[in-house]
């Protein structure tokens, strides 16, 4: 009797698995956007450039509310006692490209040795 019940159970399971067509379980109507790679030093076509240099802090705000109070020129410089900055836009899945300079002469311990200062989702430091 146990073998008969097991046979019925596994038969119905196999028939159910083979009875589904991929078109019924997957959404094939949406196609991903074609991404064109950037030429030279230009970003790819789908990139959201958060800092383009030359004083461009439009996409940033202070962690303490209000506009970012950092100095922005060819380089982005942290202003004394201005606190951190964060993007105005939130991100989920992403590819991150960053460039930063570490100290020429490494001194000190911990954060004094230099770091990127970049936090993903406001939690995880890169």
Image (tube, helix red, strand yellow):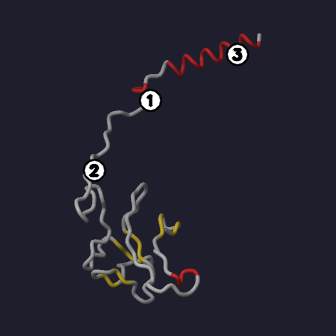
In the image, residue 70 sits, relative to residue 125, either above or below, namely: below
Q: Nearer the viewer, mark 2 or mark 3?
A: 2
Q: Residues within 10 Å of mark 3 (few under 14, many from 20)?
A: few
Q: Position of residue 7 (x, y in %)?
A: 67, 13
In the image, residue 112 sits, relative to residue 91, either above or below, namely: below
SS label for mark 3: helix
Q: Which quadrant holds residue 22?
A: top left
Q: Position of residue 116 (x, y in %)?
A: 46, 74
Q: CA distance from mark 1 to mark 3?
A: 27 Å
**Which mark is drawn over residue 114?**
none
Q: Position of residue 79 (x, y in %)?
A: 39, 87
Is 117 or 27 nearer to us in this picture? 117
Q: Residue at x 32, y 81 (%)?
A: 75
Q: CA distance from mark 2 to mark 3?
A: 51 Å
Identity of the residue furthest to the left in this view: 39
Q: Residue at x 64, y 17 (%)?
A: 10
Is 35 or 80 nearer to us in this picture? 35
**Which mark is drawn over residue 6?**
3
Q: Residue at x 32, y 43 (%)?
A: 32
Q: Which residue is mark 2?
A: 35
* Horizontal side, residue 51 vs residue 21: left or right: left
Q: Which residue is mark 1?
A: 25
Q: Quadrant of the N terminus?
A: top right
Identity of the residue furthest to the bottom in this view: 80
- N-terminal of the two: label 1 or label 3? 3
Q: Nearer the viewer, mark 2 or mark 1?
A: 2
């Amino acid at each position: 009797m146990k073998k008969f019940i097991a046979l019925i159970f596994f038969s119905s399971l196999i028939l159910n698995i083979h009875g589904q067509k991929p078109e019924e379980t997957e959404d094939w109507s949406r196609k991903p956007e074609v991404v064109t790679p950037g030429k030279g030093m230009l970003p790819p076509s789908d990139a959201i450039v958060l800092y383009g240099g030359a004083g461009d802090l439009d996409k940033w705000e202070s962690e303490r509310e209000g506009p970012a109070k950092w100095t922005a020129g060819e380089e982005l410089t942290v202003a004394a006692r201005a606190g951190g900055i964060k993007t105005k836009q939130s991100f989920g899945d992403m590819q991150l490209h960053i460039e930063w300079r570490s100290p020429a002469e490494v001194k000190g311990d911990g954060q004094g040795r230099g770091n990127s200062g970049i936090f993903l989702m406001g939690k995880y430091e890169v």
